[in-house]
Image (cartoon, rainbow, N blue to C red):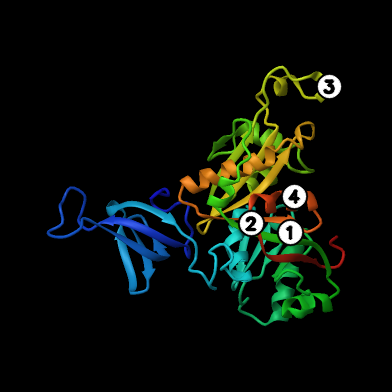
Amino acid sequence: MPSVPTPFDAVHIGARVVVRSRLAPAGEAPHDGPSMTDTVGTLVARDATRVVVATRHGDVSIHLDRIVAAKEIPPRPSRRGAAHLAPTVSDLQRISGPSWGALEREHLGDWELRASAGYTQRGNSVLPGGDPGIPLTDAVDAIERWYAVRGLPARVQLGGPIGFDPAGDPLGAELLRRNWSVGSLTLCLTAPTERIASADPGGADVIVSADAGPEWLEAHATTRSGAGTPAAVAVITGSPRHLFGQIRPGGGLSQKLGLRDADAAGTTPIALARLGIAHGWAGLGAVWTHPAYRGRGHAAHLTARLAAAAREDGIHLMHLQVEADNATALALYERLGFDQHSSYVYLTAPGGN
């Protein structure tokens, strides 16, 4: 069972976990029967000496010196069917939330408010899963104030079934009543990691690491406006766990490609992708290929190799988000084996576009 760092540094309170532990202190043999046990449930507490896991049979306190291995696992399915399609829309929103970092995260009841100095809509919007704990109109007032203090437009990532109408959602209706605008229709895709790994078309060597590294971050800084800022780095490296993938070019590249000497020497990546790992799922993002190398299958190969690495680490489910009008990317992911699960839109307060 692949482990996470003890004492659960990479796992947040509320995550579903499995913990393998000794039944007797280290160096002592149990009196009878097995020497170890697995505890499955929700991580509800931790301190310098123990963790507490809430199981179906009650809370279990486990001393850290008895833990052999531990890992985060997906939430219990809400619906029947294939595991990657079983989560409800709100469940998948909650599962995927930590896979994209944010400089600030603050909770309003079950809602999560995220701010990242304006870098990406996901990093600067509310994830409204569940009950805000106060009346809806008061909750919207609160998030408008929260973003105003940070000099950011108030924005909500509102999820629903594919093709849903935001006006049919109570929160969506309230935001529309306040003249918030709707945009950026995005599809949520999911798949088993085994399926994606098996679809690998093959290709160049892929480097996979747990840390981004300077070369990965330097290449990513060229992919979009603001991608080289400290806020962007914090977003990219802000998930509980990560896998970063890259493909580097071979030597002897033609100068007509417009690459620097370092690129021609094979030290600067020509293709990137990232997995943010949380809740036992791997979220694919930051997929990019240098324009001179597009159309050669690098993105598909890189995605499949990251899926294989996640599978080897005990992660069996994947998700990603793709804008609904990005036909090229959507065709790529569906060809690899991703299924459409749900969708979301961003609603933005007046003056925020």
Q: Indicate which disc, 1 or 4, sits on the residue closer to the N terminus.
A: 1
Which amino acid type corresponds to the residue marked 3 in the rendered image?
A: Lys
Position of residue 346 relative to residue 252, above or below, is below
Q: Indicate the position of residue 245 as horizontal and vertical percent values.
A: 60, 38
Cβ–Cβ under 8 Å for marks 3 and 2 = no
Q: Earlier in the sequence, mark 3 or mark 2?
A: 2
Which disc, if any, is residue 150?
Answer: 1
Disc 4 designates what residue? 329
- x, y percent for residue 182: 82, 67
Q: What secondary structure is marked by label 3?
A: helix
Task: For marks 2 and 1, give the CA distance.
Answer: 11 Å
Mark 3 or 2, closer to the camera: 3
- Label 4: element kind: helix
Q: Are marks 2 and 1 in contact (CB under 8 Å)?
A: yes
Would residue 8 be seen by someone viewing this image from the given angle? Answer: yes
Residue 173: horizontal and vertical position, in percent?
A: 78, 79
Asked if marks 2 and 4 touch (Cβ < 8 Å), the reply is: no
Where residue 256 is drawn, which disc sits there?
3
Q: Secondary structure at mark 1?
A: loop
How packed is label 2: few (under 14 Cα within 10 Å), some, or many (20 or more)?
some
Q: Residue at x 54, y 69 (%)?
A: 81
Nearer to the camera, 125 or 134:
125
- Identified at 73% across, 52% down, the residue is 117
* Residue of label 2: 104
